[in-house]
Amino acid sequence: MQAKHSHLVPILTIAGSDCSGGAGIQADLKTFGAHNLFGMSVVLSVVAENTARVLSSFDVPTQCIDEQIEAVFEDIPPQAVKIGMLGSTDIIACVARNLQKWQPKNVVIDPVMFAKSGFALMPPQNCALFAREMIRFADVLTPNIPEAQALCGFAIDDENAMKRAAEALHQKGAKNVLIKGGHRSENANDVFFDGNAMHILASERVETRNTHGTGCTLSSAIAANLALGKGALTAVREAKEYVFGAILHSLNLGKGHGPTNHFYRVFAPES
């Protein structure tokens, strides 16, 4: 029997791993699969974590990172790239150097700084280097409020401050900025700025503790939508809808913050 060939759009995640499967590269690949894309990965750090805590993080040597990226781009160039946890100054410099070399399109950068447990995945002293070296490559930058505060250097305690932060990060080089409002108490509205217009994206809050990996999932869903040819604002809106459903149908696994359900659209949730 002759093989039947099909074509899926290739997409790449450059991030840390999560052995418990809810965040990091594992979440990204699940999200790509849920969007019917061919997911590829470059591992930056191996993180020993679960829903309750982070035990340790081991950074991959930069030569190995260089070679992983070269292996992908010389053979299957991705239509979008999601960048997550950057655990050291050497890794930040390495990834920035490769972005300059390969010039990928549709780069979504999630400035992952803390795990849900509070473990510092990007040490605070590295924020200045990240801001200087990485933000300029972002077609979409997706910080939450604590991350935006660290990158901007001022407190963000209301919607106007979120808007100021979005403008500041755009001035630092990000083409589009999404300030995620999930840490606010009054609402979970996000602010999206494309350099011209400011958009307030209303978000309904789901009452659940199962939110492990939501930031990773959102950024990889945005990258997936960009890879499929959608504009930045549409990509963000549809990614938010996807993540809302993944949280709504989240999985009651583990002793801490359980994972979201990346395949809720594929497998009907139990009633």
Image: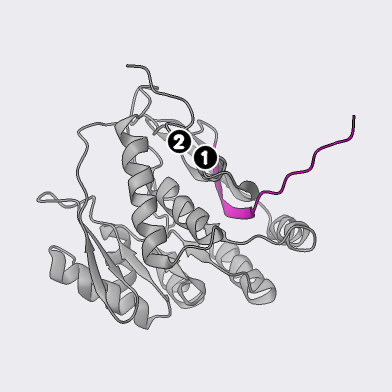
> As shown in the figure, which amino acid type bears the numbered disc 1?
Ala
User: Which residue was labeled with disc 1?
Assistant: 34
Query: Which mark identifies residue 200?
Result: none
Which residue does the image show at 56% across and 59% down from the upper left? 227
Which residue is the extreme one toward the left?
186
Specify the color scheme: one colour
Residue 40: x and y in percent read 66, 49
Which residue is the extreme one toward the right?
1
For residue 153, say whether it is visible: no
* SS at circle 1: helix
Q: Quadrant of the C terminus?
A: top left
User: Which residue was labeled with disc 2?
Assistant: 262
Is 196 covered by the magenta stretch?
Answer: no
State whether residue 73 is above or below residue 213.
below
Residue count near mark 2 (Cα–Cα under 10 Å), binned few <14, some 14–19, many ≥20:
many
For residue 80, say whether it is visible: yes
Residue 142: x and y in percent read 38, 61
> As shown in the figure, which amino acid type bears the numbered disc 2?
His
State whether residue 270 is above or below residue 188.
above
Which residue does the image show at 42% across and 24% down from the upper left? 268
Quick one: 19 or 182, which is closer to the camera?
Answer: 182
State whether residue 110 is above or below residue 199.
above
Q: Viewed as shown, does residue 245 lie left or right of 29?
A: left
Q: Which residues are magenta?
A: 1-18
